[in-house]
Image (tube, rainbow, N blue to C red):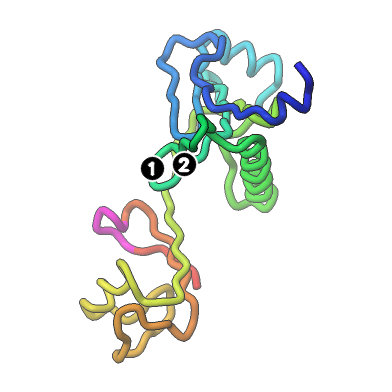
């Protein structure tokens, strides 16, 4: 097939590839994950020399060109199911930032290899769930906390006279970990 024609195609289905797995393929909104067999995980670790804990489970993660927003996969008129090249572009951006985090000692990632612009070889990992919200206005959960009397957000003291949707004097960066949602505390930087 002509390379230009391939580049113009959209990779929209990626959960039916001929990859040997004993588990159901996890097909998310824009990625599919094929967990390799224990035998294939061991073989790949030995062949590639991946620095992982002995017995680690590996997966092949296939990134598509599909678009998603608000928990829905986008489908357009005329049967268009994505944007050509979107998967490889976002994959490259994500991989760049994962590398920067690792190089700067901030965090490692589950990515072991990128053998193709749409493919990651990953190890099983436990995610640290963090939601970051950058606020210039007092609204949402910040407003609800403020209305209950909270006045310090991310080390920034707010006055007593703010109204809902009021512009705050200084932008507030609010990083929330999953413990906050379970009654824990807010972790933040400002």
Identify residue for label 1.
71
Q: Are marks 1 and 2 in contact (CB under 8 Å)?
A: yes
Locate the N terminus and report the quarter of the image it occupies: top right
**Residue 47 location (% of width, % of height):** 70, 14
Residue closer to the observer: 189 or 137 = 137
Residue 91, quarter of picture: top right
Q: Is residue 11 visible?
A: yes
Q: Give the Cα separation between the discs numbered 1 and 2.
A: 6 Å
**Residue 158 location (% of width, % of height):** 37, 85
Identify residue for label 2.
68
Q: Image height check: is 69 above or below 159? A: above
**Residue 176 location (% of width, % of height):** 39, 59
Residue 30 in magenta stretch:
no
Looking at the magenta stretch, what is its main secondary structure?
loop
| Point 61% across, 36% down: residue | 87
Q: Can residue 51 be seen in this view?
A: no
């Amino acid at each position: 097939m002509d390379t230009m024609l391939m580049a113009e195609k959209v990779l929209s289905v990626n959960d039916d590839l001929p990859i040997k797995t004993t588990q159901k393929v996890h097909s998310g909104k824009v990625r599919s994950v094929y967990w390799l067999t224990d035998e294939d995980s061991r073989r790949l670790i030995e062949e590639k020399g991946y620095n992982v804990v002995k017995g680690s489970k590996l997966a092949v993660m296939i990134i598509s060109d599909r678009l998603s927003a608000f928990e829905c996969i986008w489908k357009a008129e005329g049967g268009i199911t994505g944007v050509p090249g979107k998967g490889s572009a976002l994959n490259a951006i994500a991989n760049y930032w994962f590398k920067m985090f690792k190089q700067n000692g901030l965090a490692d990632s589950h990515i072991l290899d990128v053998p193709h612009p749409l493919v990651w070889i990953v190890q099983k990992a436990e995610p640290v769930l963090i939601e970051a919200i950058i606020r210039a206005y007092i609204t949402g959960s910040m407003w609800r906390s403020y209305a209950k009397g909270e006045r310090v957000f991310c080390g920034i003291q707010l006055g007593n006279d703010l109204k809902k949707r009021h512009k705050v004097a200084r932008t507030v960066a609010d990083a929330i970990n999953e413990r906050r949602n379970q009654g824990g505390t807010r972790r933040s930087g400002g």
